[in-house]
Amino acid sequence: MIPLRLLLFSKLPNGAVRSIYSNFGIQNPNLTTTIITHVPPPSSASMGTKVSAMVIDGKSVAEDIQDKLTVEISRMKNKFGVVPGLAVILVGDRKDSASYVHNKKEACESVGINSYEVCLPQDCREEELLMHISSFNDDPSVHGILVQLPLPSHMNERNILNAVCIEKDVDGLHPLNIGRLAMSGREPLFLPCTPKGCIELLHRYNVDIKGKNAVVIGRSNIVGMPAALLLQREDASVSVVHSRTKNPEEITKQADIIISAAGKPNMVRGSWIKPGAVLIDVGINPVEDSTDPRGYRMVGDICYEEACKIASAITPVPGGVGPMTIAMLLLNTVTSAKRIHNCN
Amino acid sequence: MIPLRLLLFSKLPNGAVRSIYSNFGIQNPNLTTTIITHVPPPSSASMGTKVSAMVIDGKSVAEDIQDKLTVEISRMKNKFGVVPGLAVILVGDRKDSASYVHNKKEACESVGINSYEVCLPQDCREEELLMHISSFNDDPSVHGILVQLPLPSHMNERNILNAVCIEKDVDGLHPLNIGRLAMSGREPLFLPCTPKGCIELLHRYNVDIKGKNAVVIGRSNIVGMPAALLLQREDASVSVVHSRTKNPEEITKQADIIISAAGKPNMVRGSWIKPGAVLIDVGINPVEDSTDPRGYRMVGDICYEEACKIASAITPVPGGVGPMTIAMLLLNTVTSAKRIHNCN
């Protein structure tokens, strides 16, 4: 079912990780605060050999989705006079957050979504932020509201995220939405962007999910937990492993599908993987690389060099799940606009 | 850690299952509608031999909880003048539902909770039911509202359950509550009664959950799904198997803890179980038994005869999880009254 390709890979760099900022699309508040002191090296025996895993090209799928959204948004504008709008609120001056917001704004513009941006100072009061959310809640030209995380420590993230009305919660992270995702017979208004992007990749590459053993590595509210719920909705038998799991490799070795969202570079080694498994790598971890002009490069949670010899398909990092997250955010915003204005 | 006991068990009956009504406390709308045509027999080699699994005595734990609730409710009454109240709404004339409601009412009375009962005819209009829910929502003497399931087919179960205000949703099945249960850093107002009872049994018997492999069999909104979320909150590595799982026994064989809520008599055989595992059997399935004066008896999802020789601890059926469900309902009602009246 999955066509095979032959690829050659060069040596991955090892070494300690600097605290750097990614300009990649995944919203991971832990990314810049974790200093990883050791990155396990891929075994030297595995280097430079031919591999057989198909590369799941998230960049190209995301582009295809964005192309279709461009056409759809144009149709909505012409037929109904509706232009989807996404509001992004940024608090403080974190460079990574500013970069994420910039990327989202650019992506919106590229497909024809109106983007609204509010930038508040680091020391702004919670009430002020809540006022902006309330104003976007009431604004009929805004169909999605996204508060860029992490927030400054003096703010109550839970209260602030709860203030976004569920009809405009394009991140899909409102507890009511997550509850509906967990329950059979209930329909969430939005699926969280990154897990939705993972499943979309599986669908696009015709990966059977029903009845398969799927393992999710990580249980974050943003990725791991909703990814597990989504896989279960697709009738996979789902296991979740996390930082407290004593024998993760014994569990992952049984998996037909792995979604890894651990945030640990090269954690998933070849020995963790069942031959023929499909691997979706949500991790995007900076590691030092003196051969890169920036001095660092991004690697996933999965040791690509080893995995691509064992898996049947694998997402690269970057260019796998990352671009899908933004594409799903745009798609959720368009879905929201259609629902609010009842245009189909 | 778990003390061992020696027990002798008699032969389990085999045979087809009649559609009969349980007077047991688990709220399982599927119970009376499933006609099971074949119950797998325990192997004859396993009969009448000595066994080593400790019996997890849910009946006695539930009695202990109810004793403590009795004292607590008396204290609340004397100190704050608050008496917890539970409203139960029954629609139609299903004998099993009537029996469940009767049991809940009796349990309330036994601990000093005021119970309020509304019985509506099978053909009552949805609006009428919603009116009663609304009235209980507004009634300050009612702290928990329970709509007995299943509802007649002309009613929209989702709309009706959503009408119960979340502060009185002692069943814990509101999607907002389930969402909070799924999310780390969020606190549900109530934990769903049956899964909460399962975890309480593990705690009472000092079963380590953190870092253990736990398998939940079944993914219902009422038991399986929230049980998996609860185990994950307790830092277990959780796998969920269900009707679409191709190799359930391969997954259950890795489990240190199994919670089974499949509704299939004797489905989990000895060969499915890892030696020393702890087994919580939520299933309560009627099977024909000519030696029983009623003509039937209740068995769990787990083939007790085989399992009790392999597991380190196991809940019996009946007398395991069943009594815990009612005890947790009473506990949730008391918790609700304390929260609403701010009495601690």
Image: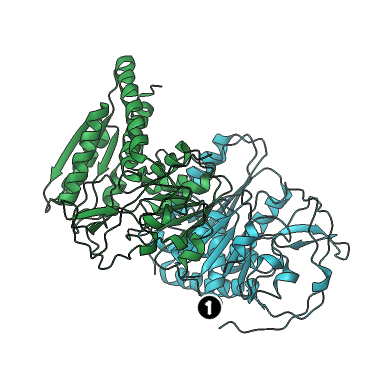
Chain colours: A green, B cyan
In the displayed structure, A5 sits above or below A252; it is: above
Residue A91, compared with residue A102, is above or below; it is: below
Q: Chain of mark 1?
A: B
Residue sitting nearer the eye, A119 or B100: A119
Viewport quadrant of the N terminus of chain B: bottom right
Relative to B106, A196 lies left or right: left
Q: Residue at x 21, y 32 (%)?
A: A115
Quadrant showing the C terminus of chain B: bottom left
Q: Amino acid at mark 1?
A: Asn
Displayed quadrant of residue A191: top left
- Answer left or right for A174 relative to B9: left
Where in the figure is residue B318, as x and y percent of width and height? Answer: 71, 66
The residue nearer to you, when weighing A34 against A142, is: A34
Could you tell me residue B166's position as x and y percent?
44, 50
User: For this rendering, which residue is in front, A343 or A109?
Assistant: A109
Along the viewing direction, whichever of B14 and B141 lies nearer the viewer: B14
The residue identified by callout 1 is B206
Inspect this view and state whether residue A222 appears: yes
Q: Is residue B68 left or right of residue A46?
A: right
Neighbour tally class for label 1: few under 14, some 14-19, many 20 plus, Cα within 10 Å: few
